[in-house]
Image (tube, rainbow, N blue to C red):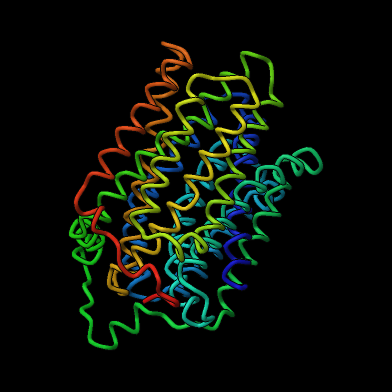
Amino acid sequence: MLLEIANVASGTGNGVVMVVLPWLVLELTGSAAAAGLVAALSTLPALVVIPVVGAAIDRFGRKPISVLSDLASALSVLAFPIIGWLIGLDFAWVLVLAVIGATLDPAGYTARKSLIVDTSRASGMRLETLNGVHEALFAVGWTFGPLIGALLIASVGAVSAFWVPGAMFVIAAASIAIIRVGDAGRDAVEAGAEEVGGWRGITRGFVALNADHALRALTIAIMILAGVYLPTESILLPVHFEALSQPESLGLVIAALAGGSVLGAFAFGWISRRLTSYQIIRLAMIGTAVAIVPMAFLPPLPFLIIAGFLLGLSWGPMQPLLNVLVQQRIPAQEQGRVFSVQLTSFYVFPPLAMLLTGAATERWGVSPVYLTLAGLLIIVGIVTLSLASVRAINHGTGSTTGG
């Protein structure tokens, strides 16, 4: 309960900031380019910090890094209304605080993911079930956060709205601080497992992930799939429905995608009792391909909603499954670093894909780009399912508490 309170609070807080921050930039500058600059510059430091964060989690412990990260995130968010009250906010202050906040936040996300194994052991809950619940609840927080942010902007204004995510991050930190679980990574080191420090320690996550061919292939596949999925949600569908002047239809399709994804993640624990890891991967790959092809032809709204729900439902189990495979196949004292490498790849590729998708859509239109992305997703699915390492991935899916 404490882990998931922290998980939902942090996800909701980030969802609020995701809406309030660009709105504040637009209020201050009136420039969409300035809002884009803040978004772009906010991601750059995290690409350097995330691998270091993984090493810190494995070296200093999962709980301490999670608590410190959420407290630091709370301070960076609360600084907006405090500085606004003391001296007034301008674009420079907003840019600095946004970069600081975006740099600090991934540490908490990665540390909480590393704590899933320890929480599973302490609670007796199946590792697969807890991973599914964890990813689903984070998605719920991330979904409702922007809605809360919009309500706050309308009621108290953009600057005062930052008090709410600040409180959310404090709740997340407090929940992890009082949680009573072990630390599998530190336990492994105390039991004699090698602890790699220095530069080798920072790069160890890349080495460990690269050495596991199945995990490496799945990480690349999910990175590409995210690069297809996210531009669909954030660029192609908005452009399509904006041209039709149907914002309510866009909301229904996005809700179907999100609802399917949450349900798929929640169902992962149930599915993992009945299917092997490879069968889940095959089901997800085929399901996403079956769903995205009709969506790419932009059918009438009811068919788009059904296909969107199927796409989200098929996509939902993939992140919990990837978590479980890392927890089962990677030594405990290296899991934080591997999670951080995966997070870095997911930070880099989807924004790049969105940039390319936006440019391509402006040049050739929604339908040709949508069909191209659907073809790419099908190719990735076929290649992934044909790899010998992925076909041989089945083992350990029936664990009860992880390890």
Q: Nearer the viewer, residue 85 or 144?
A: 144
From the image, which quarter does the N terminus lie in?
bottom right
**Residue at figure coordinates x 23%, y 77% from the top left:** 195
From the image, which quarter does the C terminus lie in?
bottom left
Instruction: Pinpoint residue 68: horizontal percent, then vertical percent.
Output: 50, 68
Q: Is residue 58 above or below residue 260?
A: below
**Residue at figure coordinates x 44%, y 76% from the top left:** 400
**Residue at figure coordinates x 41%, y 21% from the top left:** 371
Left or right, 346 with respect to 235, comes to left
Q: Nearer the viewer, residue 196 or 115?
A: 115
Instruction: Pinpoint residue 294: horizontal percent, then vertical percent.
Output: 49, 25
- Can you tell which quarter of the image residue 305 is in? top right
- Give the farthest residue toward the front: 274
**Residue at figure coordinates x 53%, y 54% from the top left:** 265
* Numbered circles on residues, count: 0
- Can you tell which quarter of the image residue 158 is in? top right
Q: Nearer the viewer, residue 62 or 320?
A: 320
Q: Is residue 165 above or below residue 366?
A: below
Instruction: Pinpoint residue 295: horizontal percent, then vertical percent.
Output: 51, 26
- Give the farthest residue toward the bottom: 191
Q: Nearer the viewer, residue 401 or 114?
A: 401
Instruction: Pinpoint residue 317: horizontal percent, then vertical percent.
Output: 47, 53
Left or right, 389 with respect to 225, comes to left
Left or right, 6 with respect to 54, comes to right
